[in-house]
Image (tube, rainbow, N blue to C red):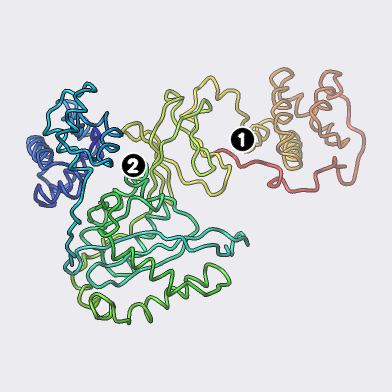
Amino acid sequence: MAGRRKHELDIRELVRLLRMGLRDRRIAREMQISRWTVAKYRQWAGEHGFLDGEEMPNLENVSESLKSQEKASIMAAVSLVEPYREFVVQKRAEGVEMKALHGLLRERGFSGSYSAVRRFVGRLDRSNPEVFLRIETPPGEEAQVDFGYTGLLLDPQTKTLRKAWVFVMTLSFSRHQYAHIVFDQKVETWVDLHVRAFEAFGGTVTRVVLDNLKAGIVLAVLNDAEAQRSYRELAEHYGFLISPCRPRRPRHKGKVENGVRYVKRNALSGREFRDVDEANRHLEYWVENVAGSRDHGTTHEAPLSRFQIERESLLPLPASRYEVTVWKQAKIHSDCHVVFDYAYYSAPYRLSGKQVWLRATPGAVELYDAHTRIATHPRATCRGQWVTQRDHLPLEKLQGLLPAAVEIRADASGVGPATSELINHLLGERPMDRLRSAQGILRLGERFGNARLEAACRRALAFGEIRYQTVKGILRKGLDIEPLPDHSGPIPRTAVFARMASEILPASRN
């Protein structure tokens, strides 16, 4: 959060931490902002009543409240020496002292003080070795997560070799692990793996520490609004803090760094698996029977033994299982639909061309304009499916849509039995090709009357000519009033396709 303006999601996350009763210093460390900023927003949240009550403020309320005052800038101060960085680095490498360096900079137009040079050089010259402390967390306090590339594995669904990654969550106190191999680092996969890990442990922790360099998904969680929104919703459901590591500080999550390395070198290295399912079955056995029972190099206890202690300190799982949720930004195209996961969902036509938020769960897709929900759809069941609400489309365009076959059949029944039979034959044989033909036959009743249309359809059926042009020709030539020939036996049928209708029809719009 440091070095950029904070948006509503950041402020709401800060309010959530304040409601949890954390001190300003702790919140500042977790969110990587100053304590002054935390104190300012603590006062602001108190004035707007966001720290009271049982329910968290929604994003709309936070957004409206922020409009009433100017957001404070937390842009980090940039040293006056920064434009001369390359020159300073070169001269320091040559052994030039800071006093002399200050004089050389002034000759080049530098107007800052010697103290500014000294502070800048002090950040460059870290001659003293950095001292750090090993921190052991209490039971149930922390878990660390990371991804590690494992090579190629066979996907049993596609029967192809695919790149695979192992997800590892390590409980910091006991060093007990959850590990699972997947083929992607999508947001929904990342969230689902957290849910599986918490369920495997039988509870959750206060804080989840994650890397922000190696795994693409973790980088997205920190910098991408879509991934942030999905992951924060997960964190809010389970009540844990999201705690990213500082850049280039792998020591800060050494437990899981070592855990991923241990999984790759001990559980997977040198072994061949038939497919990813077999690899995951082996990994599950290995976690419980090998990794869990080993003498850990730091604690000198078996992780599973320490886990028996830590299990009692884990936060209980929520009453309802988390429904994996994905947030995406989507554009409403000129056809009044957005595209998500290779399916199409309608949105109000007045918002055509606008970017909206899409929230997807396994069973539903919701669209939001800012923080206002504008549409709710059932989740598509296959690629290419159109999920449409007709009230989202402009009225003048609805007139051009083909009526549903059931509506045409109902209209034909109102004309008479012969018309109904002819239309049913027409739609039953070639529904896509004959839909407009059926519509055209019914419109002949507007010109010639339903009585004559019924007689014409009876004549067309008698001769086995189930076509629009045939019915129209009978009416124009007045043949509908001629007596029918004596005809017995089954009605000749026109040729039909060898394929079923469902094989040639695209998915219908709901």
Three-letter code for the amino acid on which mark 1 is drawn: Ala
Question: Which residue is drawn at the image coordinates 59% and 65% (left, top)?
Answer: 156
* Residue 421 spot, x, y in % from top left: 74, 39
Q: Quadrant of the N terminus?
A: top left
Instruction: In this rendered view, identify the residue nearer to me: 81 or 190.
Output: 81
Looking at the rendered structure, the secondary structure element under dot 1 is loop
Q: Place residue 70 in its image quadrant.
A: top left
Q: Place residue 367 in its image quadrant.
A: top left
Residue 150 versus residue 113 in the image, above or below: below
Question: Which residue is drawn at the image coordinates 36% and 77% (left, top)?
Answer: 291
* Residue 81 spot, x, y in % from top left: 21, 31
Other-residue count near label 2 (Cα within 10 Å), few / some / many at <14 / 14–19 / ≥20: few
Q: Which residue is mark 1?
A: 404
Front tag of 1 and 2: 2
Question: Which residue is drawn at the image coordinates 28% and 77% (left, top)?
Answer: 296
Residue 85 versus residue 297 in the image, above or below: above
